[in-house]
Amino acid sequence: MPCAPGLESSPLETVSSLGAGLCVGDIVCIHVTAKPFREVAAATGSWINHVGIVFETAGEEPLIAESTFPFSRLTRLSRFVARSQGGRVAVARLRQPLTSGEAQQVRVAARRRMGVFYDTGFKLNSRRQFCSRYVREVIGEATGIEIGDIETFATLYSRWPQAELRFWKLWYFGRIPWKRETVTPVSLLRSPQLRRLFDGVVTRDDQVGLRVVAGVPSNPSQPPAS
Protein backbone atom coordinates (compact mmCIF):
# COMPACT_ATOMS: atom_id res chain seq x y z
CA MET A 1 0.00 0.00 0.00
CA PRO A 2 1.58 3.35 -1.02
CA CYS A 3 2.17 5.89 1.69
CA ALA A 4 0.06 9.04 1.79
CA PRO A 5 1.87 12.31 0.96
CA GLY A 6 1.73 14.02 4.36
CA LEU A 7 0.06 16.54 6.63
CA GLU A 8 1.85 19.82 6.18
CA SER A 9 -0.95 22.12 5.04
CA SER A 10 -2.97 22.98 8.16
CA PRO A 11 -2.61 23.45 11.95
CA LEU A 12 -6.03 21.86 12.35
CA GLU A 13 -7.00 18.31 11.39
CA THR A 14 -9.80 15.90 12.10
CA VAL A 15 -9.08 12.33 13.15
CA SER A 16 -10.00 11.20 9.63
CA SER A 17 -7.83 13.73 7.82
CA LEU A 18 -4.91 13.08 10.15
CA GLY A 19 -5.29 9.34 9.70
CA ALA A 20 -5.43 9.64 5.92
CA GLY A 21 -1.96 11.20 5.93
CA LEU A 22 -0.25 8.69 8.20
CA CYS A 23 2.15 5.92 7.22
CA VAL A 24 3.37 2.86 9.10
CA GLY A 25 6.38 3.95 11.15
CA ASP A 26 5.22 7.53 11.71
CA ILE A 27 5.71 8.82 15.25
CA VAL A 28 2.72 10.43 16.98
CA CYS A 29 3.29 12.63 20.05
CA ILE A 30 0.65 13.83 22.52
CA HIS A 31 0.28 15.46 25.95
CA VAL A 32 -1.56 13.28 28.46
CA THR A 33 -2.74 14.75 31.74
CA ALA A 34 -1.79 12.08 34.29
CA LYS A 35 0.48 13.62 36.93
CA PRO A 36 3.67 11.61 36.18
CA PHE A 37 3.42 12.45 32.49
CA ARG A 38 2.88 16.14 33.22
CA GLU A 39 6.04 16.02 35.30
CA VAL A 40 7.92 14.39 32.41
CA ALA A 41 6.91 17.34 30.22
CA ALA A 42 7.97 19.82 32.89
CA ALA A 43 11.32 18.08 33.39
CA THR A 44 12.11 18.22 29.67
CA GLY A 45 10.81 21.70 28.92
CA SER A 46 8.33 20.47 26.35
CA TRP A 47 4.59 19.93 25.98
CA ILE A 48 5.23 16.39 24.66
CA ASN A 49 5.05 13.62 27.24
CA HIS A 50 3.82 10.51 25.42
CA VAL A 51 4.62 8.94 22.06
CA GLY A 52 3.43 6.04 19.94
CA ILE A 53 4.20 4.64 16.49
CA VAL A 54 1.82 3.95 13.61
CA PHE A 55 1.40 0.19 13.36
CA GLU A 56 -1.22 -0.12 10.62
CA THR A 57 -3.09 2.25 8.32
CA ALA A 58 -5.50 -0.19 6.66
CA GLY A 59 -8.99 -0.50 8.11
CA GLU A 60 -11.38 2.07 9.51
CA GLU A 61 -8.60 4.09 11.15
CA PRO A 62 -4.87 3.72 11.86
CA LEU A 63 -3.64 1.72 14.83
CA ILE A 64 -0.99 3.16 17.15
CA ALA A 65 1.42 0.85 18.96
CA GLU A 66 2.33 2.28 22.34
CA SER A 67 3.94 1.42 25.63
CA THR A 68 1.53 2.67 28.26
CA PHE A 69 0.23 1.74 31.69
CA PRO A 70 -0.23 -1.07 32.54
CA PHE A 71 1.28 -2.70 29.41
CA SER A 72 2.04 -2.08 25.73
CA ARG A 73 -0.83 -2.43 23.28
CA LEU A 74 -2.46 -1.28 20.06
CA THR A 75 -4.80 1.72 20.26
CA ARG A 76 -7.07 3.27 17.65
CA LEU A 77 -5.89 6.67 16.48
CA SER A 78 -9.10 8.37 17.67
CA ARG A 79 -8.62 7.05 21.20
CA PHE A 80 -4.92 7.87 21.20
CA VAL A 81 -5.32 11.53 20.23
CA ALA A 82 -8.43 11.95 22.42
CA ARG A 83 -6.14 11.58 25.44
CA SER A 84 -4.12 14.65 24.48
CA GLN A 85 -4.79 17.90 26.33
CA GLY A 86 -6.44 20.42 24.04
CA GLY A 87 -6.20 17.96 21.14
CA ARG A 88 -2.53 18.90 20.57
CA VAL A 89 -0.71 16.36 18.39
CA ALA A 90 2.64 16.25 16.61
CA VAL A 91 3.57 13.78 13.87
CA ALA A 92 7.06 13.03 12.57
CA ARG A 93 8.42 10.71 9.88
CA LEU A 94 11.83 9.32 9.03
CA ARG A 95 13.51 11.42 6.34
CA GLN A 96 14.29 8.25 4.43
CA PRO A 97 10.93 6.69 3.48
CA LEU A 98 10.40 3.15 4.69
CA THR A 99 10.43 0.36 2.17
CA SER A 100 7.55 -2.11 2.26
CA GLY A 101 9.90 -4.57 3.95
CA GLU A 102 10.86 -2.05 6.62
CA ALA A 103 7.20 -1.20 7.23
CA GLN A 104 6.55 -4.89 7.81
CA GLN A 105 9.51 -5.05 10.19
CA VAL A 106 8.00 -2.14 12.16
CA ARG A 107 4.92 -4.30 12.69
CA VAL A 108 7.04 -7.30 13.66
CA ALA A 109 9.15 -5.29 16.12
CA ALA A 110 6.12 -3.56 17.63
CA ARG A 111 4.19 -6.80 18.02
CA ARG A 112 7.21 -8.50 19.62
CA ARG A 113 6.98 -5.95 22.41
CA MET A 114 3.23 -6.19 22.99
CA GLY A 115 1.98 -7.01 26.48
CA VAL A 116 5.14 -5.85 28.28
CA PHE A 117 4.47 -4.04 31.57
CA TYR A 118 5.18 -0.33 31.82
CA ASP A 119 8.37 0.80 33.52
CA THR A 120 7.48 3.60 35.92
CA GLY A 121 11.19 4.08 36.67
CA PHE A 122 12.00 5.07 33.04
CA LYS A 123 15.10 2.89 33.04
CA LEU A 124 16.64 2.28 29.62
CA ASN A 125 17.72 -1.29 30.33
CA SER A 126 14.77 -2.46 32.41
CA ARG A 127 12.89 -5.67 31.58
CA ARG A 128 9.84 -3.43 31.36
CA GLN A 129 9.21 -0.60 28.87
CA PHE A 130 8.19 3.03 28.59
CA CYS A 131 6.84 4.91 25.59
CA SER A 132 9.90 6.61 24.12
CA ARG A 133 12.13 3.58 24.64
CA TYR A 134 9.50 1.42 22.94
CA VAL A 135 9.32 3.63 19.84
CA ARG A 136 13.09 4.03 19.68
CA GLU A 137 13.63 0.27 19.82
CA VAL A 138 10.95 -0.49 17.24
CA ILE A 139 12.45 1.98 14.75
CA GLY A 140 15.97 0.74 15.48
CA GLU A 141 15.10 -2.92 15.03
CA ALA A 142 13.09 -2.31 11.87
CA THR A 143 15.44 0.12 10.10
CA GLY A 144 18.79 0.24 11.92
CA ILE A 145 18.23 3.98 12.50
CA GLU A 146 18.67 5.31 16.03
CA ILE A 147 16.42 8.19 17.05
CA GLY A 148 16.42 10.10 20.31
CA ASP A 149 19.23 10.80 22.74
CA ILE A 150 20.25 8.49 25.54
CA GLU A 151 20.74 10.74 28.56
CA THR A 152 21.16 10.42 32.30
CA PHE A 153 18.72 12.07 34.67
CA ALA A 154 21.57 14.39 35.67
CA THR A 155 22.05 15.53 32.07
CA LEU A 156 18.34 16.16 31.67
CA TYR A 157 18.28 18.31 34.82
CA SER A 158 21.36 20.25 33.72
CA ARG A 159 19.50 21.18 30.53
CA TRP A 160 16.37 22.26 32.41
CA PRO A 161 17.50 23.23 35.94
CA GLN A 162 14.30 25.14 36.65
CA ALA A 163 12.39 21.85 36.73
CA GLU A 164 10.70 21.14 40.07
CA LEU A 165 12.26 18.08 41.77
CA ARG A 166 9.80 17.59 44.63
CA PHE A 167 7.63 15.16 42.67
CA TRP A 168 10.59 13.07 41.51
CA LYS A 169 12.06 12.84 44.99
CA LEU A 170 8.75 11.34 46.15
CA TRP A 171 8.51 9.16 43.02
CA TYR A 172 11.93 7.64 43.70
CA PHE A 173 11.42 7.35 47.46
CA GLY A 174 13.76 10.18 48.34
CA ARG A 175 16.69 9.36 46.05
CA ILE A 176 16.62 10.41 42.40
CA PRO A 177 18.82 7.99 40.36
CA TRP A 178 20.86 10.70 38.68
CA LYS A 179 23.10 8.27 36.77
CA ARG A 180 20.19 6.31 35.29
CA GLU A 181 20.06 6.36 31.49
CA THR A 182 16.78 7.09 29.73
CA VAL A 183 15.34 8.50 26.51
CA THR A 184 12.57 11.12 26.42
CA PRO A 185 9.63 11.63 24.04
CA VAL A 186 10.79 15.10 23.01
CA SER A 187 14.27 13.84 22.14
CA LEU A 188 12.67 11.46 19.63
CA LEU A 189 10.75 14.29 17.97
CA ARG A 190 13.87 16.46 17.76
CA SER A 191 15.95 13.74 16.09
CA PRO A 192 17.66 14.94 12.90
CA GLN A 193 16.65 11.65 11.27
CA LEU A 194 13.00 12.78 11.45
CA ARG A 195 11.03 15.54 9.79
CA ARG A 196 8.00 17.00 11.51
CA LEU A 197 4.85 16.69 9.40
CA PHE A 198 2.27 18.17 11.72
CA ASP A 199 2.04 20.08 14.97
CA GLY A 200 -1.45 21.28 15.69
CA VAL A 201 -4.89 20.44 16.97
CA VAL A 202 -6.86 17.32 16.10
CA THR A 203 -10.59 17.27 16.64
CA ARG A 204 -13.25 14.60 16.28
CA ASP A 205 -14.89 14.37 12.87
CA ASP A 206 -18.28 15.23 14.33
CA GLN A 207 -16.88 18.49 15.73
CA VAL A 208 -16.00 19.97 12.34
CA GLY A 209 -17.43 23.48 12.14
CA LEU A 210 -18.13 23.57 15.86
CA ARG A 211 -14.64 24.35 17.11
CA VAL A 212 -12.75 27.52 16.28
CA VAL A 213 -8.98 27.42 16.67
CA ALA A 214 -7.34 30.82 16.73
CA GLY A 215 -3.86 29.39 16.24
CA VAL A 216 -1.32 26.84 17.39
CA PRO A 217 1.91 28.02 19.01
CA SER A 218 5.00 27.40 16.89
CA ASN A 219 7.12 26.91 20.00
CA PRO A 220 6.11 23.53 21.46
CA SER A 221 6.95 24.46 25.05
CA GLN A 222 3.36 24.63 26.22
CA PRO A 223 0.15 22.80 25.28
CA PRO A 224 -2.67 24.95 23.95
CA ALA A 225 -5.43 25.92 26.35
CA SER A 226 -8.11 23.28 26.64
Image: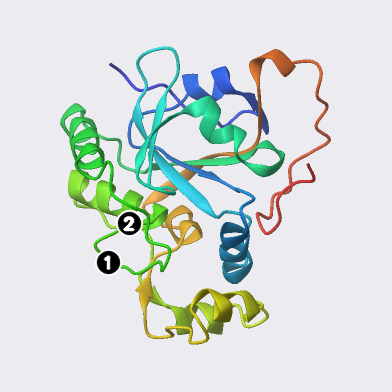
Q: Position of residue 224 (x, y in %)?
A: 75, 46
Q: Is residue 74 left or right of residue 125?
A: right
At x 26%, y 68%, the residue is: 125
Say which of 193 and 12 sits in front: 12
Locate the N terminus and report the quarter of the image it occupies: top left
At x 62%, y 41%, the residue is: 84
Q: Is any atom of residue 159 visible in this view?
A: no
Q: Is residue 205 above or below residue 27?
A: above
At x 20%, y 45%, the residue is: 143
Q: Is residue 197 above or below residue 224?
A: above
* SS at mark 2 in the image: loop
Say which of 160 and 3 sits in front: 160
Q: Is residue 101 above or below residue 162?
A: above
Q: Is residue 205 above or below residue 119?
A: above
Q: Is any atom of residue 175 visible in this view?
A: yes
Q: Residues within 10 Å of mark 2 (few under 14, many from 20)?
A: many
Q: Of the residues shown, which amino acid type is indicated by label 2?
A: Gln
- Residue 132's image quarter? bottom left
Q: Is residue 32 left or right of residue 195?
A: right
Q: Of the residues shown, which amino acid type is indicated by label 1?
A: Ser
- Residue under label 2, please give it: 129
- Residue 37's image quarter? bottom right
- Residue under label 1, please give it: 126
Q: Decide: marks 1, 2 in contact (CB < 8 A)?
A: yes
Locate the C terminus and report the quarter of the image it occupies: top right
Q: Position of residue 64 (x, y in %)?
A: 40, 33
At x 42%, y 57%, the residue is: 191
Task: Tell me the number on the disc at residue 17.
Answer: none
Q: Is residue 184 left or right of residue 100?
A: right
